[in-house]
Amino acid sequence: MNTAVVGEKVIREPPPDPVGTSESAHSYTEMTQEQCTHRNNVQSSEKPQVYKVGIYGWRKRCLYFFVLLLMILILINLALTIWILKVMNFTIDGMGNLRITEKGLKLEGDSEFLQPLYAKEIQSKPGRPLFLQSSKNISVNIVNSNNQLLTQLVTGSSGFKARGKMFEVKSTSGKLLFSADEQEVVVGAERLRVMGAEGAVFSKSVETPHVRAEPFKELRLESPTRSLLMEAPKGIQILAEAGDIQAICRNELRLESKDGEISLDARRIRLMRLPEGKASSTSSSSPGTRQTVYEVCVCPNGRLFLSQAGTGSTCQISNNVCL
């Protein structure tokens, strides 16, 4: 077997056929040499092809534009974040006037809450007042586990309202000053002062050990449409040290003592507008004289009347008032 090298091709000739002739072998060799020569000519005439890998043209320019735009947006966001942190005064301890401490949140300055505030305790700095301000009202509600309202405190433009089972006011020492519930109202202060011009109006009874007016002021107990009743188990004392006592009524004024007596102790006792009994004509005085002395008489029903005084009692003579 013969081997021939053409260019870079290695051509191996097949072994001679023992049965064939030398002419067929020679023709085969010539054909193989011509094919190899033709292939070498074709490969030498063709140029090597180069394939470009990547993005070129308008696609490349769009990619660079989007990358540049993204970098600009990143820089703007970073600048805005730094500006917000600077304006809001973000620190490790909190934000702005809000500070986070071990005991809770600490607010310095004025604070505005747009939604309900839930807190266990609200207090001001030591030595500083605490102001609660609202354009409408301020409500403080106490609810139970079932979200039912137990106590409510509302302060608004219309007034101050409190709702609960009991209301108490105590002094700094713990003494009860005022208490109110459904059963009674208790005033624990040593003195209750009513400054109104019309005084105090009570629809029902009042229990007190002492009723006194201010110095140089009048004390007036009045019931315009009903009766006025004063009672005490041990006694009632009416005292006016520097003035007069007046008891005025439209119909009857009754002084009654069931087991004791009624004493009128004064240097002068005046009984105004008592009726005068008329004596008979036989016992009348002379027409020229004026009667200036009278005798006070009492009827069996307790009515008082005047009778002209004489040398003896004249009540029996002029007792026509008792009829």
Image (spheres, helix red, strand yellow):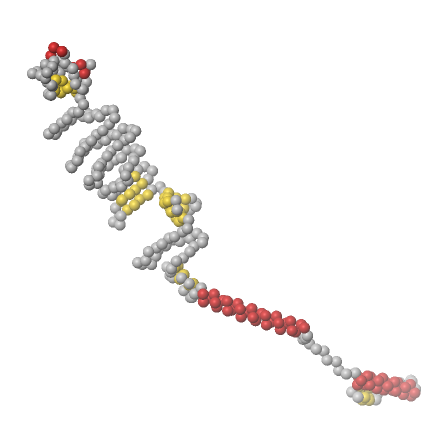
Tell me where residue 83 appears, x and y as whole percent: 48, 67
Up the image or down, 307 lies above or below 109; here it is above
Tell me where residue 215 appears, x and y as whole percent: 19, 41
Left or right of 25, for residue 246:
left
Up the image or down, 236 lies above or below 153; here it is above
Q: The C terminus lies in which quarter of the figure? A: top left
Residue at image location 78% in from the left, 87% down from the top: 8
Left or right of 10, for residue 191:
left
Residue at image location 32% in from the left, 58% down from the top: 128
Tell me where residue 86 appears, x and y as whole percent: 45, 67
| Extreme residue toward the front, this view | 288
In depth, the one of 72 and 310 nearer the eye is 310
Residue at image location 88% in from the left, 87% down from the top: 30
Residue 142 shows up from this direction: no
In depth, the one of 300 and 139 nearer the eye is 300
In depth, the one of 301 and 64 nearer the eye is 301
Tell me where residue 37 appears, x and y as whole percent: 84, 86
Residue at image location 53% in from the left, 69% down from the top: 76
Would you identify the image quadrant in which residue 205 lies?
top left
